[in-house]
Amino acid sequence: MLHLNNIKKTFNPGTINEKVALAGVELHLNEGDFVTIIGGNGAGKSTTLNAIAGVWPVDDGSIILGGVDVTGLPEHKRARYLGRVFQDPMTGTAATMQIDENLALAARRGKGRGLSWGIHAKERQRYRELLKILDLGLEDRMTSKVGLLSGGQRQALTLLMATLEHPKLLLLDEHTAALDPKTAAKVLEITDRIIKENNLTAMMVTHNMRDAINHGNRLIMMHEGRIILDIGAEEKKKLTVEDLLLKFEEVSGEEFANDRMILS
């Protein structure tokens, strides 16, 4: 489903602020893979997701998504293939629009627009059934403005919007980091369910080692713009946080120095 071939990206090349963000990333995902990505600050986790999404052009390498070479496509043309949820619950939804209107926008992404009624009764019924999956009572509040929702409710809605049309790849960029632990656990539970039920291919960046171990069927660790660990399903089931820290030290030759990740 996804092939990253020798992806390289350097910011501010030739200046005092030069930063090698991606140093030849090689990654191949099969359809239905749910990969968690961890690493210290500046390891290249979010930069990899931005490269896939086309936020900026890569310096070298190719990105093949569902058999389509999207390397040269701008961000808005890649949107038809991707679903994305960001760290900030305020991103990804229109706060002044209703819940059902936000879902309608997501359903129409990448499609032609015409002059007709905004939301038909059949659509509204579909949205009601989808919202029930979240188990947050939003199916009874479809005309509420999204800006009135809590952070957790809004992030769950964003997740539903991002997966409404079954994207080829779902990108989750620390999508629970801004939530309290109880709400984060609920959103992760919803994430697992939606990915499994729709057989989606997904990549989830997280700073939480336990979440990286407990979710998905594959775990990747990045360091200095490279993938240094790629752990498959069977080995992942037996992993502990201590095992992961030890593996990092063995592969990188350094101690893991990210308090946020270790403490979480």
Image (cartoon, rainbow, N blue to C red):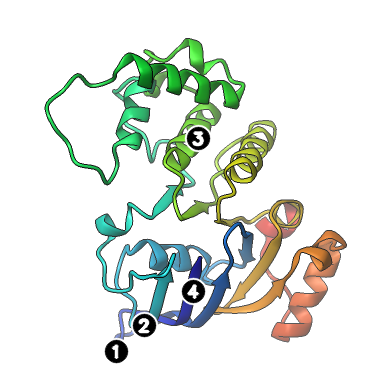
Question: Pointer 4 and pointer 2: residues touching (CB < 8 Å)?
Answer: no
Question: Pointer 1 and pointer 3: residues touching (CB < 8 Å)?
Answer: no
Q: Mark 4: which amino acid?
A: His
- State the separation of the CA atoms marked 3 and 4: 28 Å
- State the separation of the CA atoms marked 3 and 2: 34 Å
In the figure, 209 relative to 142: above or below?
Answer: below
Q: Mark 3: which amino acid?
A: Gln
Q: Give the crowd class for mark 2: few <14, some 14-19, many >=20 residues within 10 Å.
A: few
In the figure, 252 relative to 196: above or below?
Answer: below
Q: Residue at x 57, y 61 (%)?
A: 31
Judged left or right of residue 27, residue 11 is left
- In the rendered structure, find residue 3 and report the number of the disc placed on it: 4
- Label 3 sits on residue: 155
* In-front residue for pair 250/119: 119
- Label 1 sits on residue: 14
- Label 2 sits on residue: 18
Judged left or right of residue 177, residue 262 is right
Picture coordinates of residue 92, whole percent (x, y): 38, 40
Question: Pointer 3 and pointer 4: residues touching (CB < 8 Å)?
Answer: no
